Amino acid sequence: MTLTGKRIEIAIVDDHRMFADSLSFLLSDLNPAYRCTSIDSPLRALEMIQAGSRFDLILSDLIMDRMNGIAFVKALRRRGYRMPVLIVSGINTAPPIEEALRLGAQGFIPKSASSDMLKEAIEAAFSGDIFLPPELWTSFEEGRPSMPGAVEDAIETEIRLSDRQLEVLQLIAEGYSNREAAATLEISENTIKTHLKQIFRLLNVKTRAACIRRSQQIGLIS
């Protein structure tokens, strides 16, 4: 991917505005062609992209409210967006490298990275290569376990919903009642209830609000 001679649009998705703004200034110093847009949540970024905003590269924080960086990559790829995404991580333990790469991320950058490392990562992403700092390459190649805990729990990549279940889920997230969803999809209200029961079981939730929140966290819906 060659972007020489043109303005390069970069989205910085991070719910810590001070870090996002600092990274934006750093990127501008690295290359005057970089035009950075700070976005405070993955859900807002998805809305902007779906509305027509074009980004040549996305730098996304790993841990954020409602949807983490890995789920954000998953949501982008599910919707057919193929721009390179680099995950920015401030945690001290090894991030879920294998999962991120499998879902389509171009690699990880620690928040403590030098400007030289940041430049190298961006150039790798634009070239279609994977970037990992040396210590993460070592962990990845040796097959060490990925990061445990909240982020890994929130990804839940083994959850698989059918196309119909995803349609039901999206309508419920948009505020449709069971009756309205049934009329829209031209199926019975009992079928809607059956789908919801299965969705609740798969997501391990008991209420609609929890179902919507969990679905957003793992990138099933925006």
Image (cartoon, grey):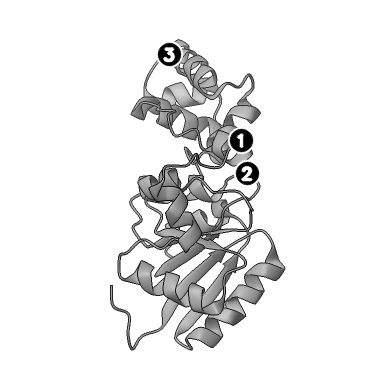
**What is the spatial separation of the Cα atoms under label 3 and label 1, in whole angstroms?**
22 Å
Q: Which residue is mark 1?
A: 213
SS for dot 1: helix
Dot 3 or dot 1, earlier in sequence:
3
What residue is shown at x 65% (from left), y 75% (from top)? Answer: 22
SS for dot 3: helix
How crowded pointer 3 is (Cα within 10 Å; few <14, some 14-19, many 20+) is rated as few
- In the rendered picture of this protein, how many numbered marks are placed on residues? 3
Q: Nearer the viewer, mark 2 or mark 3?
A: 2
What residue is shown at x 55% (from left), y 49% (from top)? Answer: 94
Percent position of residue 36, x then y: 53, 75
- What amino acid is labelled 2 in the image? Arg
What residue is shown at x 61% (from left), y 65% (from top)? Answer: 111
How crowded pointer 2 is (Cα within 10 Å; few <14, some 14-19, many 20+) is rated as some
**What is the spatial separation of the Cα atoms under label 2 and label 3, in whole angstroms?**
29 Å
Residue 174 visible in image: no
Vertical placement of residue 43 versus 1, above or below = above
Residue 90 quadrant: bottom right
The quarter of the picture where the N terminus appears is: bottom left
- What amino acid is labelled 3 in the image? Thr
Dot 2 or dot 3, earlier in sequence:
2
The reply to whether callout 2 and callout 1 are in contact (CB within 8 Å) is yes
Q: What label does residue 66 carry, if any?
A: 2
Q: Which residue is mark 3?
A: 191
Q: Nearer the viewer, mark 3 or mark 1?
A: 1
Vertical placement of residue 161 versus 195, above or below = below
